[in-house]
Amino acid sequence: MAEQDPDTIELVADPGAPFAAMGRTLAALRKAKGLTQKEVAARGGLASNNRVSDIEQGLNVQLSQLHGYAVGLGYRSIMELFRAPTDPQLRKLLRLWAVLDSAERTDVLARVWDWTVGKLE
């Protein structure tokens, strides 16, 4: 088996659960956006947050529900949702962001803000 590039975002992992890796990626994205499953369900017109949970587990994924999930995250379409970043450094940054807790994210954003304000002056 070939060694996997650590910078890639795996969408399909094993044949037994082909949507499980995609579901994990979607859950990480939702969390990075600071949204709950209930919020995504309400914004995306999905029946319940149980449906969001099913999608994030890769269970019985339907195209129409993926569209609702994408809308719930704030995207206009599934295509916009799945436009993966091509820059390896950006992918690393997104993975790091996904594991930070709320306080760490606030700290990172404050530091970036302070740095950019200095550059804009």
Image (cartoon, rainbow, N blue to C red):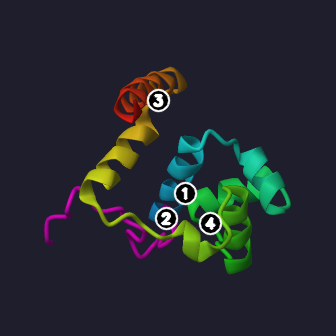
On screen, residue 95 above or below 74: above
The amino acid type, in three-letter code, at marker 3 is Leu
Instruction: Quickly name the residue at label 3.
Output: 109
Check the picture and name the quadrant holding the N terminus.
bottom left
Residue 56 coordinates in the image, percent (x, y): 59, 57
Instruction: Quickly name the residue at label 2.
Output: 22
Element on which disc 1 rests = helix
The amino acid type, in three-letter code, at marker 2 is Met
Q: Which of the marked residues, 2 or 3, is nearer the chain's N terminus? A: 2
The amino acid type, in three-letter code, at marker 4 is Leu
Instruction: Quickly name the residue at label 1.
Output: 26
What's the magenta region?
Answer: 1-20
Mark 3 Cα within 10 Å, few/some/many (few <14, many 20+)? Answer: few
Name the chief secondary structure element in magenta.
loop
Residue at (68%, 69%) from the top-left corner?
A: 76
Labelled pair 3, 4 in contact (Cβ < 8 Å): no
Q: What is the CA distance from the residue labelled 2 to the residue labelled 1? A: 6 Å
The amino acid type, in three-letter code, at marker 1 is Leu
Q: What is the CA distance from the residue labelled 3 to the residue labelled 4? A: 34 Å
Q: Which of the marked residues, 4 or 2, is nearer the chain's N terminus? A: 2
Q: Which of the marked residues, 4 or 1, is nearer the chain's N terminus? A: 1
On screen, residue 61 above or below 91: below
Q: What is the CA distance from the residue labelled 4 to the residue labelled 1? A: 13 Å
Instruction: Quickly name the residue at label 4.
Output: 59
Element on which disc 4 rests = loop
Mark 4 Cα within 10 Å, few/some/many (few <14, many 20+)? Answer: some
Horizontal side of 43 relative to 110 (left or right) equals: right
Residue 57 coordinates in the image, percent (x, y): 58, 58
Mark 1 Cα within 10 Å, few/some/many (few <14, many 20+)? Answer: many
- Asked if the magenta segment contains residue 84, the reply would be no
